[in-house]
Amino acid sequence: MSGDLASIVLPIHNQADHLRLVVEDYVAALERTRLAYELVLVPNACRDNTPAVARTLAERHPCVRVVETERGGWGHAVRTGLAAARGDLLCYTNSARTGSEDLTLCLLYAVAHPNIVVKANRKIREHWSRRLGSLLYNLECRALFDLACWDVNGTPKVFPRSMHALLALSRDDDLIDAEFASICRREGYPMLEVPIFSTRRHGGRSTTNLTSAANMYVGAYRLWREQR
């Protein structure tokens, strides 16, 4: 379908129990698309045998590469993977939450529309408190950064390497997604949001709680102040 290489960055943290199933599901789905691709696994600050599982998968599948980092942080893992990626089309996603159907859907949208940013817009949250928290955070980000998009944190996010400003992401924490959206707004990168209705989680528990949510709200404001 496309001769360009798609690099899919997968930050992974303590996911040894389900990583093999996720990666092999991705590989099977991506093979059906006939895209040229690589999966860049980024084990970060793992306390289990996730890195060993990742290396085994890389030995089994030529399309899988592993870039390990001892530092934790969603943003740091994303930036580490993007720096190592070789593709013309770049993607990162939450491997614990992203099904193969949603991943391939976003990638195919990006191939069909090569000069835009494609990102997921998750329409369903598991609990009313998460729906409310997400709504408040997205309203805050829309107001601060003058955004048109919803679900700032939604992944997969897919963009062409030619959008150089997105390769200069600097956050090491969860605010990298707000930074991503604000850069798109500043640079005038067009964005297509793909509605995602799945609530499936492959494994592990969400680290979002009242404290981390409050840190996100405060962090978004601080990011806005830094960018002024």
Image (cartoon, grey):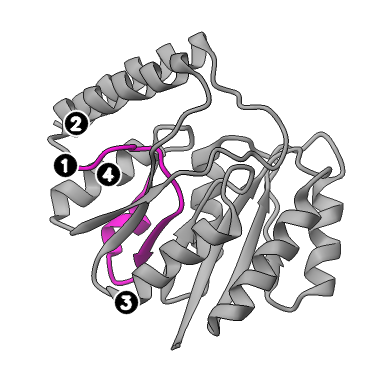
Q: What amino acid type should be assigned to the residue bearing mark 1?
A: Ala
Q: Which label was assigned to residue 148? A: 1
Foreground: disc 1 or disc 4: 1
Residue at image point 41% right, 42% down: 154
Rounded to the nearest angstrom, the CA distance separating label 1 from label 3 is: 22 Å
Hey, which quadrant is residue 63 in on the image?
bottom right
Q: Quadrant of the C terminus?
A: top left
Q: What amino acid type should be assigned to the residue bearing mark 3?
A: Ala
Q: Is residue 140 left or right of residue 199?
A: left
Rounded to the nearest angstrom, the CA distance separating label 3 from label 4 is: 21 Å
Helix, strand or loop at mark 3: helix
* Residue underneath mark 4: 181
Rounded to the nearest angstrom, the CA distance separating label 1 from label 2 is: 7 Å
* Residue underneath mark 3: 112
Q: Earlier in the sequence, mark 4 or mark 2?
A: 2
The location of residue 57, given as percent across then percent down, is 81, 65
Q: What amino acid type should be assigned to the residue bearing mark 4?
A: Ala
The location of residue 202, given as percent across then percent down, is 69, 43
The relative height of residue 75 versus residue 108 in the rendered view (above or below) is above
Decide which of 20, 29 is in the foreground and name it.
29
Residue 152 among those drawn in magenta: yes
Q: Which portion, as a residue range, is magenta?
A: 148-169
Residue at image point 71% right, 60% down: 23
* Residue underneath mark 2: 142
Q: Earlier in the sequence, mark 1 or mark 2?
A: 2
Residue at image point 52% right, 74% down: 86
Foreground: disc 2 or disc 3: 3
Q: Is residue 94 left or right of residue 129?
A: right
Q: Quadrant of the N terminus?
A: bottom left
Residue 187 among those drawn in magenta: no
